[in-house]
Amino acid sequence: MKIWSRLADYLRPYSALVMVSLAAMGVGSLLDGFSMVLLIPFLRSLFGDAAVLPGAGSLVERALDTVMGGFLAGLSPNEALRNVVIVVMAAIVLKNLFFYAASALGMTVQERVARDMRIQLYGHLQRLPLGFFDRNKAGQLVARVFTDTNKTKEIFRNTIGEALKHTVSLIAFVLVLFLISWKLTLLALVVAPLFLGFLKPMLHRLRRGFRRAYDAQGELTSMLQETASGARLVKAYRAEQYEQDRFSNTNRAFYKDSVRAERISLMSAPLSELLGAVVTLVLVWVGAQFVFSGEMTAEAFLTFLTVSLRVQSPLKGLTMFPARAQASLAAADRFLEILDTGIEPMSAGGRRVDGLEREVAYEDVHFAYDGEESVLRGVSFKVKRGEVVALVGPSGGGKSTLVDLLPRFYRPLSGRIALDGVDIEEIQLDSLRSLLGVVSQETIIFHDTVRANIAYGAADRYSQEEIEAAAKAANAHEFIVRLPEGYDTLLGDRGVRLSGGQRQRIAIARAILRDPPLLIFDEATSALDTESERLVQGAINRLLANRTVIVVAHRLSTIQGAHQIIVVVDGEIVETGRHEELLARRGPYRRLYELQFEAAAASGVGGEVEAS
């Protein structure tokens, strides 16, 4: 019931629309019941007094006499029949108008709820810790934002548009049946739920089946996204058939799970009809005994059966509803699963900091990714304000992890990182990240204009002059003005119109525009050609004044002028010092440098990080 309660929360903002929809359903159902009860005066008009059904229930007959008496009094059978037909048609037209209004309002509520769910889920995703995205494929998340919300909204359509309408109709018909024969009506109300209990095990299987199918669909979405973004690699390695086979295998699993779930779902209709037939046969048997014993007239029993057959439609709809709801509930499980994942507390509690006054300190930091071996073991070092500190070492040694801990993308298992003596865990997250500018090898360019990419997240805060100044500082202005629309040029998905060096300089301009006191360059020069690296290095050198810079690099030639070089191997610091000191020690740094010396000299790399 918890999931129903949580889904009901989405209806609360639209309670007025829901109530109006319910009212329209109620009126429509009453008109539906009224058109059925008109069977009695219709038979009277058709066959005359011989068609009077004395056992049909005095309450029903008195009500009909009150409503229809003046309309039929003194008329010939033919005229009375004509008037009854007119009233029946009017009731049917009005009934359908009210049902249409109820369905239209229900659809409006359904789409608004789906809109709210997508907005809430997307906003929640933006605030989840980075580790969540490491554990979940992008395609799975896309499926949850779109497929799962669309599937979940169907439960509101079925609830508001169908289940409630059937419920109100059923209540109206049961009321009529109760007025005709309360004994048979009570019997039906007791027997029907007993048979519905047989559906419960099937519903549990159905929900699990749809959950597996949606998971498989998410895998397909993820695979499609990966191959679309990596099309160049797929073609270069002639892996088209490999990807086709991989997709076919996953698609086969999706097919099997979907067919299994749909087969169970399809059983709900015949089972519902079968159960309805059983209930009807029970009523026929018991009602016949009442007739044989003289407790009930045949005419009253005939009327009861006629109305009870009309009950089959809403009853069948209600018995099918739980089965149909399982697909939506399975999607809702996945949707709510993400909402239940804890977010990063951006501004809750903690201190605010306005800048870096003295130093950044890593103190005995240990870290491991979920369920994996330790990546960092007892790392301690300090970065003083205005210093350039370089992290170097073999790939996989933990350099990038060290800088990922500073913005609290991840949290250390033990130890701490402090800004001016304050543990970063005690600083408000948005305040902490406002101090940082991050440029990495994995440069993110959005499908938007150059201007929007440089001023990402705060386009209204900066003027065109400020954006151009940042681009000039990053050596990007010259190539930007040569683009077809200059700063208004759309860069395409992931910046496909730009070279790697151009994308890197856009990212540097983005960091420059923010003017943060602390800059992190994670592998910032490791993926560029010689000329691009020279331009990027020049941009970095112009940023050093009055800032703290942490550089993560594989190319040792670019960080020879750093104030401090920290060599990280297998999650531990093995050497610390300036370039000349480390070379003189003939340790790990010297070996790394000698391995790269010939390649660096051949490439003609000229720029170094200048310490000021």
Image: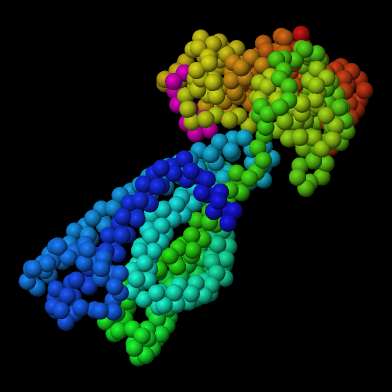
Where 462 falls versus 304 (above or below)?
above
Question: Of 307 and 598, which appears nearest the observer?
Answer: 307
Q: Position of residue 210 (x, y in %)?
A: 53, 61
Q: Quadrant of the N terminus?
A: bottom right
Q: Is residue 307 left or right of residue 127?
A: left
Q: Is residue 598 left or right of residue 572?
A: left
Residue at the image point whose x is 82% and y is 45% from the top = 373
Q: Is residue 381 visible?
A: yes
Residue at the image point whose x is 70% and y is 15% from the top = 354
Q: Which residues are magenta?
A: 487-496
488 within the magenta span? yes
Q: Quadrant of the C terminus?
A: top right
Question: Of 434 and 487, which appears nearest the observer?
Answer: 434
561 within the magenta span? no
Q: Quadrant of residue 381?
A: top right
Residue at the image point whose x is 52% and y is 68% from the top = 260
Q: Is residue 444 left or right of residue 262?
A: right
Question: Of 195 and 256, which appears nearest the observer?
Answer: 195
Q: How many marks?
A: 0
Where 367 falls versus 271 (above or below)?
above
Q: Position of residue 492 (x, y in %)?
A: 47, 31
Question: Of 352 and 420, which appears nearest the observer?
Answer: 352
Q: Position of residue 200 (x, y in %)?
A: 55, 69
Q: Position of residue 80 (x, y in %)?
A: 11, 69
Where 32 falls versus 486 (above or below)?
below
Q: Is residue 188 visible?
A: no
Where 492 falls versus 15 (above or below)?
above
Q: Is residue 478 left or right of residue 135?
A: left
Residue at the image point whose x is 26% and y is 65% from the top = 63
